[in-house]
Amino acid sequence: MRFIEEQLLISSDEQIKNISEKVFDGERITDEDALYLFNHAELSILGVLANYVREKKNGKYTYFNRNFHIEPTNLCVFSCKFCSYSQEYKHKETGWEMTIEQMLDKVKAYDGVPITEVHIVGGVHPKMDATFFGELLAEIKNHRPDLHIKAFTAVELDYMFRKAKMSTKEGMEYLISKGLNSIPGGGAEIFDEATRLEIAGDKCDSAKWLEIHQTAHECGIRSNCTMLYGHIETYEHRVDHMRRLRELQDKTKGFQTFIPLKFRNSDNDMSHVPEVTLIEDLKVYAISRIYLDNFDHVKAYWPMLGRSSAQLTQSFGVDDLDGTIDDSTKIYSMAGSEEQNPTLSTDELIELIRQSGRIPVERDTLYNTIKIYE
């Protein structure tokens, strides 16, 4: 065992010592353990423990993929207090909405380019229903069958299915039949009901979010999951959120990666809430990596954190930096992210990873290796 790990095991803090022993022995930590880490562990200790888990699962590899985003609309029937992106549908003169033809044109712009994934998310638009998006999926697959379509948060899906009077299973099977390959993890926010009600009270509740992802897994497709942190939630709320994800993963094994999302206070109804520090960011990444023992991957969205901070997260449990995102998605920049023009070439992203002492691995959406950049 390395020297620093030995020092952890002789720590003067008996609780930290006991938790460390669990981690090094491959034993699952409890909710109480995770809460203790949030409240008492030094960042250096968290980094050692998280990196141990990261390297045990994925070695020195850091994954990325070549993807692009389509954002059908920023018009939304919901009004989440933390959101800087969406415009309420009643104020639609300030927003945008794309036709199927316009979105297909964005796909065609990548003809001949080795992109493996299109990521489709946006506001919840009352006229963009299941039939509309079913047609979009079919058009994309007809044009480029090999392109993996990762699309629609659970919030979008819930609205779509209710409007179409479909059950979750019926709706999921319909979209899969049209070409849906996986779903992203957005819309989870924070699962604590009282907090969720305060920051996003009119969207689907936590139980529905979890039901939609469980149904997706049962229908044979994978998904990601997220947690919005750094607003009005407590450490207890974070642990509760991760516990529900870990329990569902025990049931279905359908989650691919966990993605902590940092609350940004630019131009929204929670601008009075200060943003948390980089130290708190790293604490969240590290503890999630330690706690979510049944997850293969923890991802950092480099556009939201910024390139240098994203590099640092790789020493705190992160093994995935998402993708090249080379169409400058508006979701990040409108939320006040560190990267106002979130575009990286593949070579730039590879160098970003290498500078951190990691080995870049290009993957597809399902984490099949395309190329290792030794």
Image (spheres, rainbow, N blue to C red):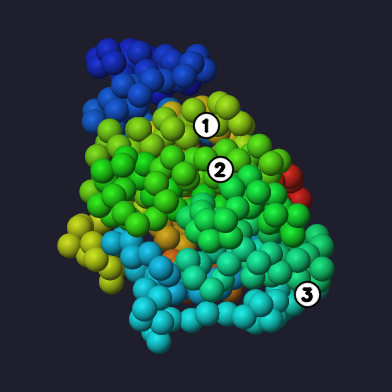
Q: Which class describes the residues within 10 Å of circle 2: few (<14), some (14-19), or many (20+)? A: many
Callout 3: helix, strand or loop? Answer: loop
Q: What residue is shown with label 1?
A: 248
Callout 2: helix, strand or loop? Answer: helix
Q: Is residue 103 above or below residue 349?
A: below
Q: Earlier in the sequence, mark 1 or mark 3?
A: 3
Residue 10 seen from this side: yes
Q: Picture coordinates of residue 89 (x, y %)?
A: 40, 76
Q: What residue is shown with label 3?
A: 111
Callout in the foreground (3, 2): 2
Determine whether label 1 and label 2 are within 8 Å by CB.
yes
Callout in the foreground (1, 3): 1
Q: What residue is shown with label 2?
A: 213
Kindly identify the amino acid type of the residue bearing the numbered disc 1. Answer: Leu
Kindly identify the amino acid type of the residue bearing the numbered disc 2. Answer: His
From mark 1 to mark 2, how far is it between C-alphas?
Answer: 9 Å
Callout 1: helix, strand or loop? Answer: helix
Q: Which residue does the image show at 36% across and 81% down from the upper left?
A: 91
In-image side of 36 versus 343 (left or right): left
Q: Which mark is residue 307?
A: none
Residue 50 seen from this side: no
Q: Earlier in the sequence, mark 3 or mark 2?
A: 3
From mark 3 to mark 2, how far is it between C-alphas?
Answer: 31 Å
The one nearer the camera, 355 or 367, is 367
The one nearer the camera, 163 or 156, is 163
Q: Which residue does the image show at 35% across and 57% down from the upper left?
A: 202
Kindly give the residue lying farthest to the front in the view shown: 165
Q: Earlier in the sequence, mark 1 or mark 2?
A: 2
Kindly identify the amino acid type of the residue bearing the numbered disc 3. Answer: Asp
Q: Which class describes the residues within 10 Å of circle 1: few (<14), some (14-19), or many (20+)? A: some
